[in-house]
Image (cartoon, rainbow, N blue to C red):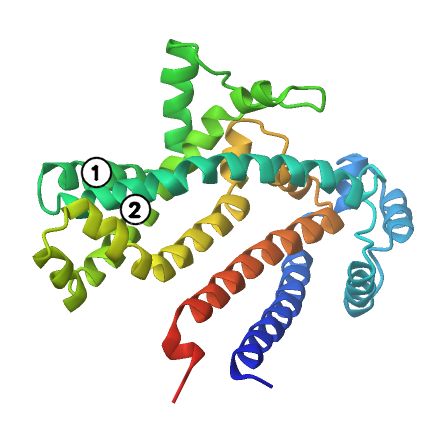
Amino acid sequence: MPYLIKLILQRLAMGAGLLLAVSALIFAGTEILPGDVAQSILGQSATPEALANLRRDLGVNEPALARYLGWLGGILTGDLGTALTNGTDIAAAIGKRLYNTLFLASVAAAVSVPLAILLGLIAVRYKNRWPDKLISSTTLTFISLPEFFIGYILIYFVAVKLGWFPSVATVYESMSFTERLSAVALPAATLTLVVLAHMMRMTRAAILNVMQSAYIETAELKGLSAFRVIFKHAFPNAIAPIVNVVMLNMAYLIVGVVVVEVIFVYPGMGQYLVDHVAKRDVPVVQACGLIFAAFFIGLNMLADIVAILSNPRIRYPR
């Protein structure tokens, strides 16, 4: 088997094993959650007999190992189970929520990735001059602030004072594309500001590293303009670490939206997860946790494979 295919298969097997380990950790984590779904459904005035009957009906009295194996078997066959609190099918409910979350993450990525690369290129072109210092200090300021603070600042100034966009990101199926874009403008802007600095600084560092190469000096001696040297000669050779950090931030945009969705009351996976954590609805929490983990592991694995494919020293080892 060619070395490269073997290496990629090893990464895929490692990702599958890691996801299995994460499923066990998620199940163990939900087991030690305080509170009880039966108590949450019946309230504090429920009698012990009523609580015992409901726990038996919901199957939460079965041994933990049997419940884990049953849950894992259901996952492998595409059955995420039903929510304990309302009996709805979890897969159907998550499908709509996941679409909303991916739409929000896609809008944020469509803005943040090209903007971060452009700012990184400008920072390299004007290294240690005022454009570089302005870009670095501004993006570092935003990355130093917590997401909820940026979100509330945007709500106050952009939604309340200026009235440009709604403060609550309500979306529904009959909305047009432009209406949906307007609804997610503020949460997407919050996510963009959070991830922008990381990608911009990685782009800047990767290109500056390539700029130390001898062939860059040759290109400069030929009299090529600074932007042409950076765009045509340095940027293509720095693409591997840039793609890597972009993939990592894409994973964050999908997995790290919980706080942003709660702030803007956005009907995505994060809001769905938080609602059911409060109700102690363990199957929903487990399903959401596993889907978030699958996205995070999958995108990290993809970044790893891209790094392998773009690095000749890994593709053709001695």
Question: Secondary structure beneath disc 2?
Answer: helix
Q: Earlier in the sequence, mark 1 or mark 2?
A: 1
Answer whether residue 272 is visible to the viewer in this image: no
Say which mark, if any, is on residue 155. none
- For badge 2, the amino acid type reads Met
159, above or below 204, in the image = above
Say which mark, if any, is on residue 135. 1
Name the foreground residue: 82 vs 8.
8
**Which residue is depicted at the point 52% across and 83% down?**
3
| Side (left or right) of 172 relative to 4 | right
297, above or below 90, in the image = below
**Which residue is depicted at the point 46% across and 37% down?**
110
Q: Quadrant of the C terminus?
A: bottom left
Question: Can you identify the residue that label 2 sits on?
Answer: 200
Assess whether mark 2 and mark 1 are in contact (beta carbons under 8 angstroms): yes
Quarter occupied by residue 70: bottom right
Quarter occupied by residue 66: bottom right
